[in-house]
Image (spheres, rainbow, N blue to C red):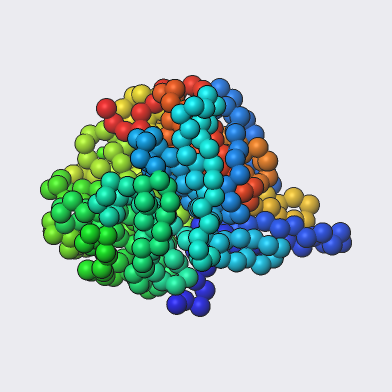
Amino acid sequence: MSSRPFSAFKFWWIFLFLLGSSGTIFFTACSSTESHSDTSAGPSSVSGTVFEVPLEYDAGENPIGLTLGDFNGDNKTDIIVTSPRKQNGITTSEDGTLTLFQFNSSSTSRFPFSSSTITPTTAEWRQDVISADFTGDNNTDLMVTHTDQDKIKLLRNDGSATFTDNGSVTVGDVPLNLVSGDWNSDNQTDLAVVNRDNSSVSILQNSNGVFAVTQTLPVSEKPIQLADGDWDGDNDTDLAVLSRDSTLVQIWLNNGSGTFSAQSTTYTVGSLPIDMISGDWNCDSKLDLAVSNSGDNTISLIYGKGTGDFDSPIIISSGKGPGTMAAADFDNDSKMDFVVGHQFLVSTSGFSLLTGDFSLTLSDNTSSTGYATPVSFAAGLAKNEASPAELVIYDVDNDSKLDVLIALPISKKLAVLSGKQYFGNLSCP
Ligand SMILES: [Ca+2]
Ligand SMILES: [Ca+2]
Ligand SMILES: [Ca+2]
Ligand SMILES: [Ca+2]
C-alpha cells in the first residue's frame, strides 16, 4: 500500500477552506490538490439551444462513476452510479453504494428510469466500476476496484439486478481504472487494471468467471488511465496507458494470445493529464486516442495510422480544467465531437470553491486543428456545486438526440441534460 493512496484524480475527499474573520468554514470536495485551474470567473450557466436545463436525481453520497448496461435482462439500457466514499463533515468513510437507475418502459419522462440503492454488505471503497458479462450467463455483471486494498472484485448479477460478491483478486498498488476486453479471443471477457503507485498494469484473464493475473506490464510513472482497441488492425485488442507524472501515452500491442509488448514510440501529452478515451475521431477506420490535460486547458488528439503507430499529437483548446471526456458525432459530419467535464476553483473575496461545467467541442473542417472553439454549459442546477466527475453521452430519452449524463459528487446528483439540437451518432457511420 502507498502511504498516500487516495490522492489520485477522481479521488474525492473533503477539503476545507477557512474564511478569514467570519470564521465560516466552507466544505467542498476536491479530486486532486494539484490539478485545478484557479479563476475568478464562475462556471457557465447557459444551456441555450443545445441542451435542456439539467434534470437532477439523487445518486448516493459522493457519485463519481457511471456505467451503462442492461442489468435486468429486458434489453433496455440501465444506469449504475457508484459512490465510493461518504462525506461527513471533515471526515470521509468507505461507502461503495451503487445507485441503480432502471429503465421504466411505462414512464413518459425525459428520464424514464426508476432509482433504487444497492448497498454493499461491507462498505468498500469502489473507485472504478465497469459492466460486462464476466461469467458467461448473459447477465451483465459489475467489476469494481477495491482501491485501498489493492484488489478488484466481481459483483455477479443474478439477472434481476441483484449483485453478489463473487470474490476478489489482488492486483498492483492503488488500482484506479479498469478496462475489459477479450485479450485471447476465447469469448470470455478479460480485464486490465492500471495500478498507479507501483507504475504497473495488471493483465487478468478470465476462466469461467475466475480471474488470474497473467502478465504485469511495467509502465511509465504514475499511470492513471487505460484505453483499449485494435491499434494495428490484426483483430486482437491492444492497450494504451496514460501516465500522469511522465505525461506520456504508451502503446502495448497484443500478440493474439493476450500477451502485450510495449511499442518503443511514446506520445507526449499536456500537463496534468486526467482522462484518455479511444475512438475513431476522423472515421477513417483507424482508431485514435484523446487525452484531457487539466494543467494547460487542452485536449491532445492522437490519430492512429492503423499500424500500431500514431501521429504526433494535435492540441486543441478546452475550457478550464478539462477532466472526464466522451465523444460522439453530434452534428452528423462523420467527425467525432467531444464532450468534456471541467473542474476548477473559483477564488473570490478570500475563499475558493471547487466548481465546474462541461463543454461541447464540435468538429470544424475550416479550422486548422479540425475543431471549433468549445462551447461551455452548466453541468447542474446548483452551479457552484456542479463539478463533473464523470460523464457519458447517450440517447437517454430515445428521441435520437444525444443527451449527456453527468455524475456530480458535491451536489450528490446524477444530472441529465437532454439534447435539443443535434440528432447525433455515438459512432462512425
Ligand atoms: Ca491488435
Ligand atoms: Ca481514425
Ligand atoms: Ca461532428
Ligand atoms: Ca435524447
Q: Is residue 198 above or below residue 22?
A: below
Residue drawn at (23%, 59%) of the image: 208
The spot of residue 77 in percent (x, y) is 40, 37
**Relative depth, front residue between 219 and 427:** 427
Residue drawn at (43%, 51%) of the image: 162
Q: Is residue 15 left or right of residue 402?
A: right
**Residue 74 appearing in the image:** yes
Q: Quadrant of the N terminus?
A: bottom left
**Residue 365 appearing in the image:** no
**Relative depth, front residue between 286 and 115:** 115
Q: Is residue 314 above or below residue 189?
A: above
The spot of residue 219 in percent (x, y) is 31, 67
The spot of residue 163 in percent (x, y) is 42, 54
Residue drawn at (53%, 31%) of the image: 111
Q: Is residue 160 left or right of residue 359?
A: left
Q: Quadrant of the C terminus?
A: top left
Q: How many marks?
A: 0
Q: Residue furthest right?
A: 21
Q: Is residue 238 left or right of residue 113?
A: left
Residue drawn at (50%, 41%) of the image: 101
The spot of residue 157 in percent (x, y) is 37, 52
The image quarter containing residue 191 is bottom left
